[in-house]
């Protein structure tokens, strides 16, 4: 066991797992944990199948850019729609959801097309992050006979990420629906912006690397709040229901 | 099928905003403005979100997100 490889893989994979878990957590607040974990399982199966089908780092590495762009575009399509709806509701341009009515229809949501779209967001997010973890494991393990250390570090990194995420889940579940979807929409748009631009411009396009995700999320949250404040006076002339 | 596609990709305005964003990203990178893209693209994205939110007033009925 090489602890240097283990710790490097642990830290690098933890960043990817946090990104994957963030998406799954966000989606689970909408469609529930069972469906979200189903998406995780499906992504894991797809990852294994993809790895077996393509085989080799180069084959997967060459295609990762296009997968990243595809997923980035999909996240933008989904996240922008969510955030725009949340901003419109926050500004009073359209009526707020009735929380109790929404709660009653939560189970039915899984069967709706929006539920499927949210499921796909979790699926594709985990698939992309899983591919990146796989590349990290292979890159750190090759040439140093440290595949076990590398894979061990990546797998061990799941534990703290899931524990912290589980701790945060309960407080998040009490957040009002529109506020929650506002934040989730901002996060998904942040991921979509990050991945689409990185796919087109390379990993060096972001000056502060993966930390740009946090900055983007804050930017969209603050920008969305500003948009609500600016659009609110316009809504006084009439609200659609 | 139409409902599924609309759910996955949104309406025409949503697709237009995302399409223009990707075109802007590609144009900036190919045009040598890649260093500015991380600062410009989020602003363009937020502008698109504001436009979509504002345009919902005249056309949107409330429903599940």
Image (spheres, rainbow, N blue to C red):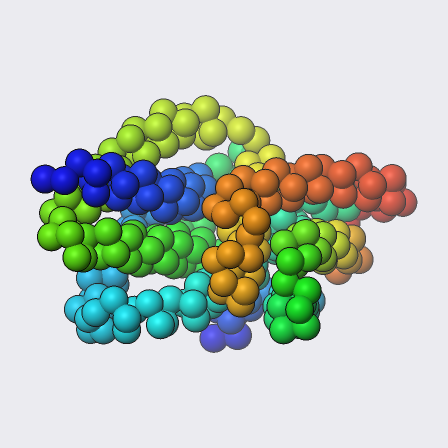
Instruction: Reply above or below: A189 against A225.
Output: below
The residue under the point 18% across, 57% down is: A142
Residue B37 sits above or below residue A209 on the image: below
- Residue B46 located left or right of residue A51: right
Q: Nearer the viewer, residue A111 or B38?
A: B38
Residue A38 placement (x, y as % from top left): 28, 51
At horizontal 35% and vertical 72% (from top left) the residue drawn is A62
Q: Above or below — where is A222 with respect to A93?
A: above
Residue sitting at x 38%, y 66%: A64
Task: Return the x and y of residue B18 as percentages of the image width and height.
Answer: 63, 65
Q: Residue at x 36, y 32 (%)?
A: A165
Q: Is residue A120 left or right of residue B40?
A: left
Q: Quadrant of the N terminus of chain A?
A: top left
**Residue in front for this viewpoint, A152 or A225:** A152
Q: Is residue A101 left or right of residue A223?
A: left
Q: Is A125 placed left or right of B60 in the picture?
A: left
Q: Which of the 4 image quarters holds residue A7?
A: top left
- Position of residue A239 measured from the top left corner of the image (x, y, whole percent): 80, 46
Q: Position of residue B62 (x, y in %)?
A: 66, 50
Query: Is any part of residue A41 visible from this angle?
Result: no
């Amino acid at each position: 066991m090489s602890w240097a490889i283990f710790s490097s893989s642990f830290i690098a994979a933890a960043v990817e797992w946090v990104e994957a878990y963030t998406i799954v957590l966000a989606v689970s607040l909408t469609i529930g944990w069972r469906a979200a974990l189903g998406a995780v399982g499906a992504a894991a199966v797809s990852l294994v199948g993809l790895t077996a089908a393509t085989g080799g780092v180069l084959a997967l590495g060459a295609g990762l850019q296009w997968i990243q762009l595809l997923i980035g575009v999909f996240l933008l399509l989904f996240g922008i729609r969510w955030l725009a709806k949340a901003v419109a509701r926050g500004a009073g341009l359209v009526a707020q959801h009735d929380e109790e009515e929404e709660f009653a229809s939560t189970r039915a949501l899984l069967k709706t097309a929006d539920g499927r779209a949210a499921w796909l967001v979790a699926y594709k997010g985990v698939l992309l992050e899983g591919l990146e973890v796989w590349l990290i494991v292979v890159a750190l393990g090759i040439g140093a006979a440290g595949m076990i250390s590398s894979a061990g570090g990546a797998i061990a990194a799941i534990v703290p990420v899931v524990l912290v995420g589980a701790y945060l889940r309960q407080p998040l579940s009490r957040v009002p629906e529109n506020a929650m979807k506002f934040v989730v929409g901002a996060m998904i748009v942040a991921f979509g912006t990050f991945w689409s631009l990185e796919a087109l411009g390379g990993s060096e396009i972001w000056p502060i690397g993966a930390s740009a995700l946090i900055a983007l999320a804050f930017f969209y949250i603050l920008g969305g709040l500003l948009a609500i404040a600016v659009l609110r006076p316009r809504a006084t002339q009439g609200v659609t229901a | 099928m139409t409902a599924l596609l609309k759910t996955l990709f949104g309406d025409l305005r949503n697709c237009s905003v995302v399409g223009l964003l990707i075109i802007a990203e590609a144009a900036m990178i190919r045009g040598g403005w890649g260093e500015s893209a991380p600062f410009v693209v989020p602003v363009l994205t937020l502008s698109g979100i504001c436009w979509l939110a504002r345009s919902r007033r005249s056309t949107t009925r409330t429903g599940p997100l």
